[in-house]
Image: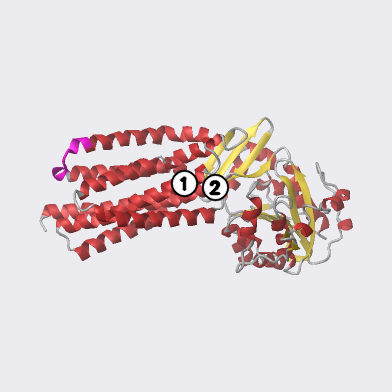
């Protein structure tokens, strides 16, 4: 090959790597969008990755039709990826806010398939062009594929550690679209001698660039207005952490915290939830000195525990350090938790709760499990027999556990399956539920190594809602929320413990919450 051909082949290899990076970023971005807006992260990532790969297969098949004018074909493919992918997040929020229910899912899956198809056309065209330049077919295929696959790894890392935490989903889409467009314009310029009507293509590319830049600078503000419609109250804080989208809303005195769109607490009625979560176990344990809180990064459960003077240490395990940081710095959260996480008795550990229990040698008098609902595989493991067995193994005799266990009204079988799973570890259980206006009727499972006598529970600290006398009432379930209502075809369902091998709780959760 001559010097010009070598230079052109290098351009093709570099282009292949860069557009591969962009393709992977769009692929995981669509999964993140689905997880945030549609829920069930594992399901959405599975669907978007599957659809993206299917689209790539369709695109690769269609690439057979492009045997001539390879460079200009590649340029227009990048124009398409830039404009469709660039506006994907922005339009997704708009559709979610204004379109009928279900339209957002259809739209997300459609653009995933479409961008995947366009991405699938890229490689075959670049391989043919490299071969046309004079690189042997074996070498051109191997080198382009190497650039593509290695670019995929870089793209995934960039999204997780750079784009999502620093730019969010809307700006990331526009930025990556700009990168696709830049590659197209560079290739267009360097191969301009073999392109007819070069100026026309260049003007169109620059026009797309202007549109994308407008989106980059102003799109997030507009998308914020769209997203505001997903929440009842005005948004006063929003950020993307490495794990989730964190949102705080406020209307008059009502401050609400949302993680990935799911309500965590309302300052108006959080005391109902947290007092039932904390005080029965603290009042039951013989000598509650060492306390473990799994979850609870907002610090409110820790605030309730700190009401007991005899507490010597609280270990709070929460996966996301951004939530803990916000709980320590945001004035609204500080008012709600009264600065509990800054107390010298509190040690915060940012790690997965399952991993923490596997690795720690500590024993605890009280263990409070305040984790998100089991709506995906990563959370499901925190509602398994294996997990609760580890909880039991770190609980001293005479101690107690309290587990938030979703709603026995909205998800009756889920609640009683969690209770059955806890019982399967050999722990004795007691069941509570309480009406929390912002949540609805919510359930808890209390557990201990010994049989629980509610009459032995004493609550001596100040509370707004709970009293020892009302505990028997909280342990009474109506006919439409008791385990006896869990039936199929008229027959009572035999509840099975949820396990890592048989994670059936996820399927039950999706089925029961579909109408709420």
> In the drawing, does residue 75 fall left or right of residue 5?
right
Q: Are marks 1 and 2 in contact (CB under 8 Å)?
A: yes
Chain part drawn in magenta: 192-200
Which comes sooner in the sequence, label 1 or label 2? 2
> Is 477 colored magenta in this rendering?
no
Mark 1 to mark 2: distance in Å?
10 Å
Residue 315 versus residue 168: which sits nearer the camera? 168
- The image position of residue 142, as x and y in percent, is 26, 64
Label 2 crowd (10 A; few <14 / some 14-19 / many >=20): some
- The image position of residue 206, as x and y in percent, is 27, 35
- The image position of residue 378, as x and y in percent, is 57, 59
**Scheme by which the image is coloured:** secondary structure
Residue 274 versus residue 8: which sits nearer the camera? 8
- The image position of residue 297, as x and y in percent, is 63, 49
Main secondary structure type of the part rendered in magenta? helix
- Label 1, secondary structure: give it: helix
Q: Residue furthest top?
A: 252
Q: Residue furthest front?
A: 489
Q: Name the residue under label 2.
A: 38
Q: Mark 1 points at which residue?
A: 108
> In the drawing, does residue 208 fall left or right of residue 199?
right
């Amino acid at each position: 090959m001559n010097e010009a051909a070598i230079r052109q082949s290098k351009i093709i290899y570099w282009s292949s790597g860069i557009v591969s990076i962009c393709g992977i970023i769009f692929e995981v971005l669509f999964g993140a969008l689905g997880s945030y807006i549609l829920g069930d992260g594992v399901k959405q990532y599975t669907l978007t990755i599957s659809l993206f790969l299917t689209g790539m297969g369709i695109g690769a098949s269609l690439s057979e039709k492009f045997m001539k004018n390879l460079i200009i074909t590649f340029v227009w493919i990048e124009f398409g990826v830039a404009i469709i992918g660039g506006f994907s997040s922005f339009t997704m929020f708009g559709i979610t806010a204004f379109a009928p229910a279900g339209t957002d899912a259809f739209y997300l899956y459609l653009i995933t398939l479409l961008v995947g198809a366009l991405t699938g056309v890229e490689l075959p065209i670049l391989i043919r062009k490299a071969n046309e330049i004079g690189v042997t077919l074996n070498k051109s295929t191997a080198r382009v594929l190497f650039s593509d696959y290695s670019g995929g790894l870089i793209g995934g890392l960039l999204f997780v550690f750079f784009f999502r935490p620093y730019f969010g989903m809307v700006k990331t889409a526009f930025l990556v679209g700009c990168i696709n467009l830049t590659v197209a314009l560079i290739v267009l310029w360097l191969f301009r001698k073999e392109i007819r009507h070069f100026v026309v293509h260049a003007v169109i590319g620059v026009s797309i660039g202007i549109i994308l830049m407008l989106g980059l600078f102003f799109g997030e503000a507009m998308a914020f207005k769209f997203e505001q419609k997903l929440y009842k109250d005005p948004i006063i804080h929003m950020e993307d952490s490495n794990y989730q989208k964190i949102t705080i809303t406020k209307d008059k005195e009502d401050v609400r915290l949302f993680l990935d769109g799911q309500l965590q607490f309302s300052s108006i009625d959080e005391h109902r939830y947290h007092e039932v979560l904390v005080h029965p176990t603290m009042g039951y344990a013989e000598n509650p000195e060492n306390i473990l809180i799994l979850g609870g990064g907002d610090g409110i459960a820790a605030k309730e525990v700190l009401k007991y003077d005899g507490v010597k240490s609280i270990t709070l395990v929460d996966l996301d350090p951004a939530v803990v940081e916000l709980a320590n710095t945001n004035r609204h959260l500080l008012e709600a938790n009264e600065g509990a996480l800054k107390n010298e008795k509190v040690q915060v550990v940012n790690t997965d709760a399952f991993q923490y229990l596997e690795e720690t040698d500590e024993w605890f008098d009280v263990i409070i499990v305040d984790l998100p609902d089991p709506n995906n595989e990563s959370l499901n493991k925190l509602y398994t027999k294996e997990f609760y067995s580890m909880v039991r193994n770190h609980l001293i005799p005479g101690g107690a556990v309290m587990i938030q266990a979703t709603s026995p009204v909205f998800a009756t079988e889920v609640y009683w399956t969690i209770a059955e799973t806890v019982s399967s570890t050999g722990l004795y259980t007691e069941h509570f539920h309480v009406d929390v206006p912002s949540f609805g009727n919510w359930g808890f499972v209390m557990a201990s190594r010994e049989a629980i006598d509610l009459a032995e529970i004493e609550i001596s600290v100040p509370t707004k809602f709970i009293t020892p006398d009302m505990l028997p009432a909280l342990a009474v379930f109506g006919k439409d929320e008791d385990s006896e209502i869990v039936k199929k075809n008229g027959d009572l369902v035999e509840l099975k413990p949820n396990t890592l091998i048989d994670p059936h709780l996820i399927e039950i959760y999706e089925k029961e919450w579909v109408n709420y």
